Every structure is written in structure tokens, then in C-alpha cells.
Image (cartoon, grey):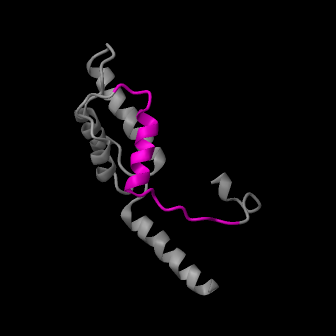
Amino acid sequence: PALLRPGRFDRVIYVPPPDRRARLEILKVHTRKVPLANDVDLEKLAELTEGYSGADLEALVREAVMLALRERLEARPISMNYFLRALNTVKPSLSKDIVDRYVKLYEDLKRMII
């Protein structure tokens, strides 16, 4: 894409997907203004979303809200059920194979530099 054209950036930096703790914090940020039902377990969602990027997690929250709105127009707290259903639709944008390739490339380049 345009960002990768020569002259745009001098370096390409690999940023791994967020770990469980970071995913939890990202979920907290994106659900801050969303009314959540008492059964919503963000810790569990953080566990279930291994490999998801910050943008993927944002899309997951948005999809859960949209699922709830499609079923009922009045504003009610979003239950865990909507998040679990959203997981069936919103998948990680990077597959484990791609992440593994980036990690291997990073390790190979690190060895070459050191």
C-alpha cells in the first residue's frame, strides 16, 4: 500500500499482536461508553481473542452493539451473548501462520544484526 512505498518510512517495525493483558485494556477502552450487562466478562473475552489486533477488538465491540441493536431498538445493556455471537463474525485480521512468519523473520534479522 501507499504507506510502504519507498521514501514514506525509513524502517519497517514489527509490532506483535497485543497479549491478554493488553487485549483486556483495549476492550475496556472500546466498551467504556457501551452499557454492559452484569454477565459481560471482559477477562474471558480477552482470553478468547488471542491473535486479535486493537482494530479487530474495536470491530468486535462494534459488532456486538450492532447485533443487539438489530434485535431491539431500545437501548439496553449489551450481554455477553452478543459478544460471543460477534466472535463468530469478527475474526483476527492476522492468521497465526502470518504472525509466526513475522516472528521468525524478526528473529532471523535480529541474529543477522547482532
Observer able to see residue 52: no
Is residue 26 within the magenta segment? yes
Residue at the image point whose x is 64% and y is 65% from the top: 12
Screen quadrant of the N terminus: bottom right
Which one is nearer the viewer's eye here, 101 or 106? 106
Question: Magenta residues?
Answer: 11-35
**x and y percent of residue 23 in the render?**
41, 50
**x and y percent of residue 38 in the render?**
25, 30
Q: Is residue 88 left or right of residue 35?
A: left
Give the quadrant of residue 57.
top left
- Compared to residue 105, the image places residue 26 above or below, namely above
Residue at the image point whose x is 64% and y is 84% from the top: 113
**x and y percent of residue 76 in the render?**
30, 19
Circle count: 0
Which one is nearer the viewer's eye here, 76 or 90? 76
- Kindly give the residue lying farthest to the right in the view shown: 7
**x and y percent of residue 31 in the render?**
41, 34
Observer able to see residue 73: yes
- Compared to residue 5, the image places residue 104 above or below, namely below
Q: Is residue 29 left or right of residue 114?
A: left
Is residue 23 within the magenta segment? yes
Residue at the image point whose x is 25% and y is 40% from the top: 84
